[in-house]
Amino acid sequence: MTKQGQTRAGWVLTILVGLFLAMDAGMKLAALPVVVETQAAMGWPAQAASARLLGGILAGCLALYLWPRTAVLGAVLLTGYLGGAIATHLRIGSPLASHTFFGVYVGLVLWAALWLRLPGLRPVLIAHPARP
């Protein structure tokens, strides 16, 4: 794939993951009843305020990820956010492939998008053995 093709593919993945996370953040910010009920089932407080707080955190991390100058910081913060979701699902015994690992899948896509659109990031992410 050409360099331009990689950049385009990276932006397509960025947009896809961005739309999904924006929808998730929007649902939390709106504190939809389904969100509050699901939070309660997962052991979180059944309060609109906690849903809005999580939505605000997610929206802030997503904004950093979508802005090119802060994309790496946003990816690191989103990885932490998704790690919390993974831990929550693991704690309550959600199905592994569909629920618990979903955060892993989203994280892999968001980092793959950065990998494709930021070639300068690749040497940082690949461990090279020390040269004599």
Image (spheres, rainbow, N blue to C red):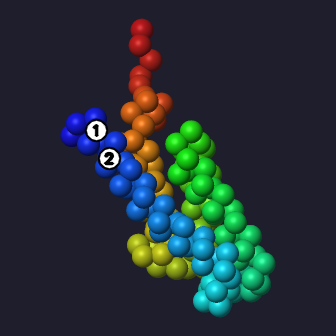
Q: Report whether 84 appears left or right of 99.
A: right
- Which quarter of the rendering shows the N terminus? top left
Which residue is label 2 attached to? 8
Against 113, residue 124 (above or below) is: above
Q: Amino acid at mark 1?
A: Gln
Q: Position of residue 32 (x, y in %)?
A: 64, 86
Q: Residue at x 41, y 22 (%)?
A: 129
Q: Report whether 19 appears left or right of 26.
A: left
Q: Position of residue 85 (x, y in %)?
A: 59, 68
Q: Amino acid at mark 2?
A: Arg
- Tag of residue 118: none
Can residue 66 be seen in this snapshot? Answer: yes
Q: Which of 129 and 80 lies nearest the eye of the viewer?
A: 80
Q: Which of 121 and 132 lies nearest the eye of the viewer?
A: 121
Q: Residue at x 52, y 79 (%)?
A: 94
Structural crowding at the residue carrying mark 1, measured as other residues with C-alpha within 10 Å and reported as few (<14), some (14–19) or many (≥20)? few
Which residue is label 1 attached to? 4
Which residue occupies the extreme left position in the image? 1
Discs 2, 1 touching: Cβ within 8 Å: yes
- Which quarter of the rendering shows the C terminus? top left
Q: What is the count of numbered marks?
A: 2
Tell me where residue 29 sits by quadrant.
bottom right
Helix, strand or loop at label 1? It is helix
Against 118, residue 20 (above or below) is: below
Measure how far apart labels 2 and 1 are at the Cα level: 6 Å
